[in-house]
Image: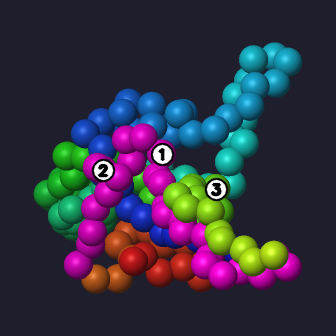
Amino acid sequence: MKYIFKKYEFESQDLAETRIAALPHTEDEEGNKHPSHSHTVVKLGNVVVEQGTYDEEGNELTAPVLADKYSVDVLWKASEITEETEAAVLDEEGNVITPAVTEIDYPYGWSSKEIEIEEGNGVHTFAGHNFS
């Protein structure tokens, strides 16, 4: 299985929650919604961009500085967001002459919020996956 690790920043937690809620879900008999997708979404919140300082007893001297934007990491399951744009061409025996053409199609509202980080995986990673 192929997965794609992406990082996002939203102007607010509400906007992030709206985008997450728009991912495929099912609803049970009691009206509770449950994800029906296989993507892994981690809400990081407003991450610390500058550490606070503290004295020997743990008293805060300088408050930490938080990012203005709400961060979310997603490990997308590629097969669930891959669209076929051109069908494969087969010969009479069913052998592939030209393979299908596919592209990744992220859900509405995600691509414009994607961020890049300079190096490493940032404040969060998914075990066995490197941010790219």
> Which amino acid, mark 3?
Glu
Q: Secondary structure at mark 3?
A: helix
> Which amino acid, mark 1?
Pro
Residue 92 or residue 54, whichever sits in front? 92
What residue span does the magenta drawing correspond to? 93-118
Q: Which residue is mark 2?
A: 113
- Badge 2: how crowded within 10 Å, few (<14), some, or many (20+)? some
Residue 104, placed above or below residue 19 = below
Q: Which residue is mark 1?
A: 107
Q: Secondary structure at mark 2?
A: helix
- Residue 1's disc number: none
Residue 34, placed above or below residue 118 = above
Residue 11 or residue 24, whichever sits in front? 24
> Which amino acid, mark 2?
Lys
Any part of residue 114 in sight: yes
Tell me what residue is drawn at x 45 percent, y 31 percent.
18
Question: CA separation, marks 1 and 2?
Answer: 11 Å
Residue 92 or residue 130, whichever sits in front? 92
Classify the position of the N terminus by image quarter: bottom right
Residue 30 horizontal side relative to residue 130, left or right: right
Question: CA separation, marks 1 and 3?
Answer: 10 Å
Q: Earlier in the sequence, mark 1 or mark 2?
A: 1
Q: Secondary structure at mark 1?
A: loop
Looking at the picture, how far across and down is residue 80, in whole percent? 64, 56
Q: Earlier in the sequence, mark 1 or mark 3?
A: 3
- Residue 80's disc number: 3
- Badge 3: how crowded within 10 Å, few (<14), some, or many (20+)? some
